[in-house]
Image (cartoon, coloured by chain):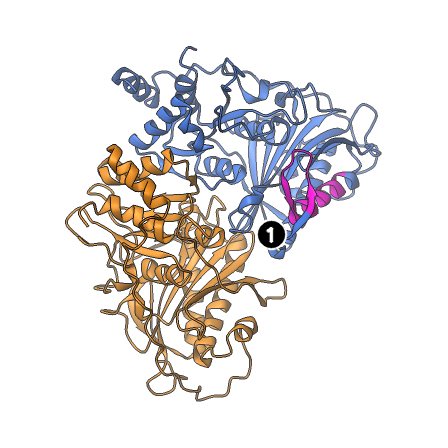
Chain colours: A blue, B orange
Amino acid sequence: MCKLQWMHLAMLRQGQDTHSLAQVPVQAPSSTKLMPEPVTALCLPALRQLMPDLPADLEQLLGAVARASKRIADTLRTGDAHTKSGIENTFGDEQLHLDVVTNEIAFEELRACGLVHIASSEETPTEEDLGAPKAAPGEGFSVSFDPLDGSSIIDTNFSVGSIFGVWPGRGLLGRTGREQVSSILTVYGPRVTLVIALPQAAAGPRTVQLMLQHDSTWEMIHENLRVAPAGKIFAPGNLRATADNAAYKQLVDFWIAERYTLRYTGGLVPDVYHVLIKGKGVVTNVVSAAAKAKLRLLYEAAPIALVMECAGAASCTAPGPNGEHPEPISILDLPIMGLEFKCGVAYGGVEEVAIFTKLMYPGS
Amino acid sequence: MCKLQWMHLAMLRQGQDTHSLAQVPVQAPSSTKLMPEPVTALCLPALRQLMPDLPADLEQLLGAVARASKRIADTLRTGDAHTKSGIENTFGDEQLHLDVVTNEIAFEELRACGLVHIASSEETPTEEDLGAPKAAPGEGFSVSFDPLDGSSIIDTNFSVGSIFGVWPGRGLLGRTGREQVSSILTVYGPRVTLVIALPQAAAGPRTVQLMLQHDSTWEMIHENLRVAPAGKIFAPGNLRATADNAAYKQLVDFWIAERYTLRYTGGLVPDVYHVLIKGKGVVTNVVSAAAKAKLRLLYEAAPIALVMECAGAASCTAPGPNGEHPEPISILDLPIMGLEFKCGVAYGGVEEVAIFTKLMYPGS
């Protein structure tokens, strides 16, 4: 890297140029109607208290996700990470027993809430029609999910996560992440925590955090997580790509030389969550010809992008080795061209993602 | 780094030179006597089943550590990571509320077992005399511990750990890690797991793993964890030291260029545990003039070294910026010159630590 580049990056770090990422306004809320059946129990009273305007059907759906998360946490507590299920998923990954069980739990809860038209899991990437029997006409949701993100680090007892993306209406293909009405990350660690993106909250987009209590209720512990524009924490995913991606190598060298704090568990959910909770930093997953993209837009990249952007962070594509994503855009604006569509990503403070963009897209 | 060095390191990786680390035999077991009171309940039946020769008093002590770990896990589940206790420990670190609570739990259980003479915690680094009222004459233990290692990543819901080192008899100062009769790491993550070093097991030194079950018992899930000599996983602690430590910078560049897999949570216990469970890799914490040593030999470095060496891994000092540790030696052979004595470390597969030694101690 030449000295001029370093100076430019240093200026960026000091905030002199933070406008290179377009700020796209979040969509206006779609109209919501009352549920056809009375809501007899609030699943997440802490959320209702914070947001009296939360649509009842979305609250019901979030309750289903919270119940699934609780059950998955219980399953992980003693589940055997070493039992192979003997099933391969359709992408060819070997599935662990826990992947199968947690996948079934998520489907059960989404089906039971009666509000889901299409559900699609990273473990079984098809569009399952759940019928949404309790949805009012024209209402209901479609949900993508990864029930157990980070299964390679389950045996090492690292924190792992679940990811849920929630779209209004029926269908997932051809839509964008920006159309989501919510997305949820669950972190299974010493505690069980949920972060929920609420792009249509009356007071403006926000990301909240809840923690599972001993009595199985969820306590609100952060009402509005915010990620600062600049902050020296980095999580360099797919680091092997630096071997044949010179721009990524430069970026990693920059972070190390600038004495950024390294945190990289290898689990995308905990790594993103770290930035959310510390309120600063950047998480990347960059690709190269030899180290191909692994993140799926529908199941991972888009739901996470919503959580991050609702917390004031930015998201951005990474250019692919064969000309994919020639211009930097928000992950939320990438059309979901297929259930298995993959991409490289950056998430983080606006200035940190601007540094990423300057190095990874030198011509832009 | 010159080409010759690269070639040499490549040779090391291929195993042509793995004898640079002295293999010091583990001390012969000291004689053990029956407890003065009958053992009415086995605390860890899985351990007794595996090792009929386990001394009864050591089993009792391990039971106390297991009980403390269970209680700490319950406390972490919903404890507030953000409450400051208002107390500073004697090293000047700000203490979190959870540090205080977990410290008290560990002291309570060690006191209750009646077999501990001296207990010393990283949180309150003095030598507490617990009296060992149930120990037979000439028996009993002294225990060092860090009840909550990784408190900076509690709020981010990353896995964290506890560390316990167990010495026979009375007193900790002036001894070495090699004199320990056991050491224990607890990992609090999606599960609660214990790894226990048993240097005096009849069949030879070993490190075992147990997992906490829903009914509060501990199930044996690994009877003999082994770390392979070579394996491309790295956890580069104190990465900021690369800014003013050229040798460490070379080492990090080597790992990246050789496409090692990065895993670095920032918690020493989970990072070491990752190597133990994957059975390969290297964890380092290197120092420089600007990025000083943080690891305490008594509370962290020595107990972890025993767990690693009993699993067939190596441990090694890192040279200090002021001439500290001029020769590479096992962490287990460093005398504990003070409760707060600090050092840089490497833990990992024998060949991986040999690579570390060649670069960090170029003259040796």
Look at the picture and state if A302 lies above or below A155.
above
Residue A223 percent location from the top left of the image: 54, 37
Residue A40 percent location from the top left of the image: 78, 43
Q: State the residue in front, B59 or B360.
A: B360
Q: State the residue in front, B155 or A253.
A: A253
Look at the picture and state if B91 lies above or below A184.
below
Q: Quarter holding the N terminus of chain A? A: top left
Tell me what residue is drawn at x 21 percent, y 47 percent.
B361
Left or right position of B25 against A27: left
- Which region is colored magenta? A86-110
Mark 1 Cα shell of 10 Å, populated few (<14), some (14-19), many (≥20): some
Residue sticking out furthest to the left: B322
In which image quadrant can residue B289 be found? top left
Q: State the residue in front, A339 or A32.
A: A339
Residue sticking out furthest to the front: B16
How many numbered dots are placed on residues in this image? 1
Label 1: chain? Answer: A
Q: Is residue B240 visible?
A: no
Q: What kind of element bears circle 1?
A: loop
Look at the picture and state if B182 lies above or below B351.
below
- Amino acid type at circle 1 is Ala
Q: Is residue B164 visible?
A: yes
In which image quadrant can residue A2 be found? top left
Q: Quarter holding the C terminus of chain A? A: top left
Residue B303 percent location from the top left of the image: 36, 62
